[in-house]
Amino acid sequence: MPAASAAPLPQTQPGPATPTPTAHFRHRAPTPTPAPFTLRDILLWCVLPVLIVLGLRLFVFGMYAIPSGSMENAIMPGDRVITTRLSPRPIALRRGDIIVFKDPANWLANEGATHNSDRLIKRLIGLPGDTVECAGNGAPIVINGVPIDESAYLKPGVEPSRSAFSVTVPAGRLFVLGDNRANSADSRAHTNDGAQGLVPVGDVEGVAFMRYWPFNRVGWLSARHDVFRAVPSRTPTS
């Protein structure tokens, strides 16, 4: 009996090639490495902002704590205010400005200050050349013959001036009054100090325009230039 022959193996048809695992993914660019923080970056982002803030603080803005109640109710004792140092130069001073100035003749001794200070804050009433006067006892302040209505900023219930006075402001000087006239040792109280109670223009350090502390009193300070709109200017004498 013939031996059975081996059956031929079935031929397998070659199928599609199995894709490699990376065939379905696109080539990815390498992740960029962050650039190192250079000296230029330190100067640009750290040093320059500090210099700008310091420059503004030294040459443009001033910050002061108010030691007395002479400017109530606009400014209370303990309030802190911001001033612009651009006045009196290059921006000219105007009547109504609230100015901060060096104590010209120990005025603070009569101010009842709540803490040590060598600066005062008052409202500018008379410019060089102005004649500022008052008959007292409730009469209005008169500047160059024009009476002014100060009710917009005077502390309620306070007279413009209980005492009478008349002062002509010479060149380079200023006449100032507090808004709380009943508690303000201002130009009226120093007529015998050798300068008629007038403040040298060179002693002015800035014009206050904002309260920044305490938080519940943050707000703008009004110069009320409109109060003096009808007052004519006069040329000062030396």
Image (tube, rainbow, N blue to C red):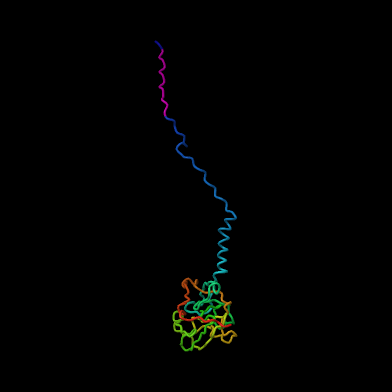
Q: Which residue lies furthest to the front in this view?
A: 235
Say above or below: 7 vs 224: above
Whether residue 112 is visible: no
Image quadrant containing the C terminus: bottom right
Q: In this orientation, which residue lies closer to the viewer: 68 or 96?
A: 96
- Residue 105, how many percent across, how many down? 59, 82
Q: Which residue is drawn at 47% across and 40% down?
A: 26
Q: In this orientation, which residue lies closer to the viewer: 90 or 46?
A: 90
- Residue 140, how many percent across, how many down? 46, 86
Q: In this orientation, which residue lies closer to the viewer: 105 or 164?
A: 164
- Residue 174, how many percent across, how many down? 55, 80
Magenta span: predominant SS is loop
Q: Residue furthest left?
A: 1
Let me know if residue 36 is in the magenta part.
no
Count of numbered labels shown in the rendering:
0
Q: Which span of residues is magenta-colored?
A: 3-15
Whether residue 29 is visible: yes
Q: In this orientation, which residue lies closer to the viewer: 97 or 32?
A: 97
